[in-house]
């Protein structure tokens, strides 16, 4: 295992025509950030936006590195947590950035997890109708998920991420050393998005994860770099074919239709992290696939065994689901953005590594599945 | 003069690759709207957003025409006025639209003036990260200005239109009959954007306007259609070359750097309409051009005579500018989006119909001009 900082870095180019950009992955990137960031700036001026938790660890070294590269740095620190993705915080952030007297050539840097990436990305898309922005994701989830795809946004009274923009960063710096300050629960939640890429269309990557996921979770930097890079590359392949989510990109929602319903029911809070909801949702998607006779039961068993071995959450029994109802979960799902013409879209699988988009799942089959899960009959 | 409704219509195609769309101009389009709108909808469902004033005249006929075309119609009516372009109204509008249970295939229709176009356009760009939208502009200003260019946005504490998106409509229906319900002041304010296109790069159009502007203002439908179409075509030419405002598009800001400072000083309200500010600002831009020896004094005199003949506002003396200062106006201008690297951008002119972008105007020359104007020494 290599621990040499900033040497074992790898770069992935996300090809999107004139919106192409690099994702740099490696341990210790933040303290060398100036070197990577200076070349992509229109002018040497940035505003870093971060949250209180992340600021404590990384704001000082990031600022120092940028200043050493002769970049003018302002910083805005927000409260940590999902509640920052509100209209109110969006307004406050936009006004705070404008109050700095920024110009069109100023670049925003989102330093933190998915909340920062989503919020700052939408602010960057909107302020002066578009400022350049750079992502420095500090969680496993945001390194593999928010780094690619250009989805930004805030939450609404009617659901999560329902207002936002498709907006690409100029650069992503994924410093795998930041994962050392993540607690195990957050790491596991992020891992559910990593394994998703194996389950969608990469049986080889899935097998590699079966062998190496435990080491990755336990802190092996090489394994982390490989997993982050492979996940980003997998996502980038899908996004390059379908930037604005008309078709194939829906595959990335494996586990998310069910997951969003669980998050809605638990209030999008600490009771159930997004990655945890996706973990349970992915198990449900495979369970639905096998119940419909689309996927061999042994593949469902194999993925369930892997999730259980890592202690990923896999069923509703651990949630306080006593008073949940099938009707309520169905209602949450029908508010999902992925609804088209009143029909729910599910990502199902024929095998591990062979996911597909289905728009013809019958409501009664979904209801039956939910009923079984709610009754703990798995 | 032809008054035949819906027959004398002309269509302008705005060429922007896959974001291309048509602007249809003619008298009486709203009551035939279903015919024009049905073919561009992904699914037959729309949400009309309008303001109280416009709703009183046009919401019923627009709704009827759409329903006659088997389109499902919801409508949201907002308070009239610039204050609707706030973060608070943006949030309320997004939530109201989501509350209707809309889908990605739902289309928004902005019915009204520039405020509606800007606000609804930004909501369309942002809700579910992008709904299709259609503009039905009902003022001369919005027909010639907001119909082309894709600029949407809201106001901030730090200035107008500082948060928004570049977002193109699927269709613009400019019904010139709606101008009959505009008061003369609004018509004249809109005319200042019409004449701008002549002044920028179309000396022939400028000359046509010298001969026909009075008839256009007085209600000649053929002249109105020609003026709206020619203005949209002129703007479309510039925008097609520079969709995201990196270069040539700045020409469209003729009169706007000064104009924005005047609007900021008067509070963006009824004291000074946007078009009135642009009118005075355009006169100031030509005055600056001739003072710098760039433009013959006779061209300045010619444009001033035309503006005065139509009774367009042409100088600060009619505003309550007694306590204004050069410093405050300079400060307003330096908050304009068009500032780059601390330098103000001005649109100046070598002749009528030969405008150009200048980034090397000296602050002292601008201060001198403002000082002269504030002292009523014109």
Image (cartoon, coloured by chain):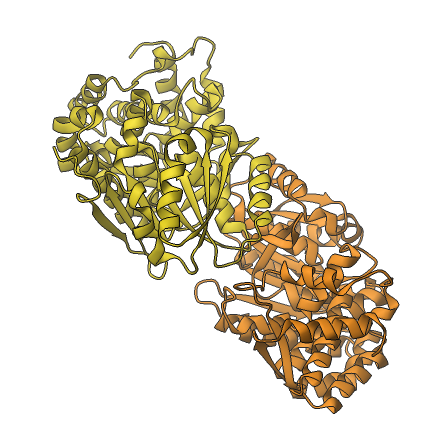
Chain colours: A orange, B yellow
Q: Which residue is drawn at 57% across and 71% down?
A: A250
Q: In which quarter of the image is residue A280?
A: bottom right
Instruction: Measuring from the top left, give residue A238's x and y in whole percent.
Output: 54, 74
Residue B27 seen in the figure = yes
Q: Residue at x 71, y 58 (%)?
A: A113
Give the answer, above or below, for where B251 lies relative to A154: above
Q: Which of the pair B34/A303 is nearer the observer?
A: B34
- Say left or right for B337 vs A116: left
Q: Which of the pair B229/B256 is nearer the observer?
A: B229
The N terminus of chain B, quarter of image: top left
Instruction: Measuring from the top left, give residue B118's x and y in whole percent.
Output: 44, 40
The C terminus of chain B, quarter of image: top left
Q: Residue at x 70, y 74 (%)?
A: A194
Q: Which residue is drawn at 42% across and 12% down?
A: B321
- Say left or right for A99 vs A77: left
- Say left or right for B19 vs B122: left
Q: Which of the pair A179/A354 is nearer the observer?
A: A354
Q: In which quarter of the image is residue A300?
A: bottom right
Instruction: Measuring from the top left, give residue B108's x and y in whole percent.
Output: 45, 48
Instruction: Measuring from the top left, give residue B91's x and y in whole percent.
Output: 59, 41
Residue A45 seen in the figure = no
């Amino acid at each position: 295992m290599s621990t040499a900082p900033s040497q074992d870095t790898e770069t992935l180019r996300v090809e999107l025509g004139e919106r192409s950009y690099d994702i740099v992955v490696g341990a210790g990137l933040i303290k060398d950030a100036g070197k990577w960031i200076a070349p992509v700036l229109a002018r040497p001026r940035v505003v870093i936006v971060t949250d209180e938790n992340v600021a404590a660890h990384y704001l000082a070294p990031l600022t120092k590195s940028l200043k050493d590269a002769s970049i003018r740095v302002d910083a805005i620190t927000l409260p940590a947590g999902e509640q920052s993705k509100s209209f109110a915080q969006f307004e406050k952030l936009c006004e705070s950035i404008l109050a700095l007297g920024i110009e069109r050539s100023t670049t925003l840097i989102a330093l933190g997890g998915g909340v920062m990436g989503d919020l700052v990305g939408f602010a960057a898309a909107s302020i002066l109708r578009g400022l350049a922005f750079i992502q420095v994701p500090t969680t496993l989830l945001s390194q593999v998920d928010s780094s690619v795809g250009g989805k930004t946004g805030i939450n609404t009274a009617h659901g999560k991420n329902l207002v936002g923009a498709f907006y690409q960063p100029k650069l992503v710096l994924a410093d795998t050393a930041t994962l050392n300050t993540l607690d195990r629960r957050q790491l596991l939640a992020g891992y559910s998005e990593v394994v998703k890429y194996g389950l969608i269309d990469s049986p080889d990557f899935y097998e590699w994860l079966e062998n190496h996921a435990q080491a990755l979770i336990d802190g092996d930097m090489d394994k982390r770099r490989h997993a982050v890079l492979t996940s980003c590359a997998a996502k980038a392949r899908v996004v390059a074919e379908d930037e604005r989510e008309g078709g194939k990109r829906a595959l990335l929602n494996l586990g998310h239709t069910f997951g969003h319903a669980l998050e809605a029911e638990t209030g999008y809070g600490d009771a159930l992290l997004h990655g945890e909801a996706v973990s349970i949702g992915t198990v449900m998607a495979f369970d639905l696939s096998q119940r419909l006779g689309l996927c061999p039961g042994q593949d469902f068993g194999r993925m369930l065994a892997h999730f259980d071995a890592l202690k990923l959450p896999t069923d509703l029994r651990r949630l306080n689901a006593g008073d949940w109802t099938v009707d309520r979960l169905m209602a949450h799902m029908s508010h999902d953005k992925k609804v088209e013409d009143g029909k729910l879209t599910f990502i199902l699988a024929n095998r591990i590594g062979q996911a597909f988009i289905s728009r013809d799942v019958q409501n009664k089959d979904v209801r039956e599945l939910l009923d079984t899960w709610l009754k703990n009959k798995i």
